[in-house]
Image: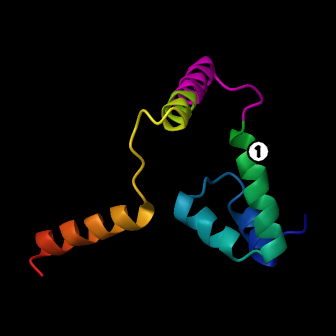
């Protein structure tokens, strides 16, 4: 990846200095779009984990069970389904009442 002149000038004079977040952000914003995308990908990959943590697996399993439970309730008609238009109308009425209009 080719760096713009601003990076090269700064690195020559501030080689041992650490940059603040705002300085790094301003420098990154000066990069061409393709290099900003590459930088974003690189930063994301530095945070990404190969294996989800145990807690994440437990939460994911719990959500999958909850989704299955809710789908079963809908399929068995154990819960009353409310049409979206009805919910939106009720929400609009509540908002209007709260705003006094």
Q: Is-magenta flag for residue 57?
A: yes
- Whole-percent x, y for residue 28 in the image: 69, 68
Give percent across and percent down for residue 25.
Answer: 61, 66
What is the number of callouts on the image? 1
Q: Residue at coordinates 52% horizontally, 27% vertically from top-left?
A: 69
- What is the x, y in percent for residue 50? 78, 30
Q: Is residue 66 above or below residue 2?
A: above
Q: Is residue 77 above or below residue 11?
A: above
Q: Residues within 10 Å of mark 1 (few under 14, many from 20)?
A: few
Task: Quadrant for the C terminus, please.
Answer: bottom left
Dot 1 falls on a residue whose secondary structure is: helix
Residue at image x 68%, y 51%?
16
Asked whether 84 or 37 is in front, the reply is: 84
Outermost residue toward the left in this view: 100
Residue designated by label 1: 45
The foreground one among 14 and 88 is 88
The colour style of the image is rainbow
In the rendered image of this protein, does residue 100 appear above or below residue 84?
Answer: below
> To which quarter of the image does residue 30 belong?
bottom right
- Which segment is the magenta one? 49-66
- Answer with left or right where residue 90 lies relative to residue 70: left
The residue lying toward the viewer, choosing from 4 and 51, is 51
Looking at the rendering, which quadrant does residue 51 occupy? top right
Horizontal relation, residue 99 to residue 27: left or right = left
Q: Is residue 41 magenta?
A: no
| Residue at the farthest front position | 77
Magenta segment main secondary structure:
helix
Q: Residue at x 60, y 23 (%)?
A: 61
Left or right: 38 with respect to 84? right
């Amino acid at each position: 990846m080719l760096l713009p002149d601003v990076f090269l000038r700064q690195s020559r004079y501030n080689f041992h200095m650490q940059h603040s977040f705002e300085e790094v952000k301003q420098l990154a914003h000066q990069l061409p779009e393709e290099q900003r995308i590459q930088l974003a990908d690189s930063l994301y990959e530095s945070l990404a984990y190969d294996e989800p943590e145990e807690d994440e697996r437990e939460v994911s399993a719990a959500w999958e069970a909850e989704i299955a439970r809710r789908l079963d309730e809908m399929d068995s008609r154990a819960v009353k389904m409310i049409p979206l238009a009805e919910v939106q109308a009720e929400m609009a009425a509540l908002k209007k009442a709260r705003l006094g209009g």
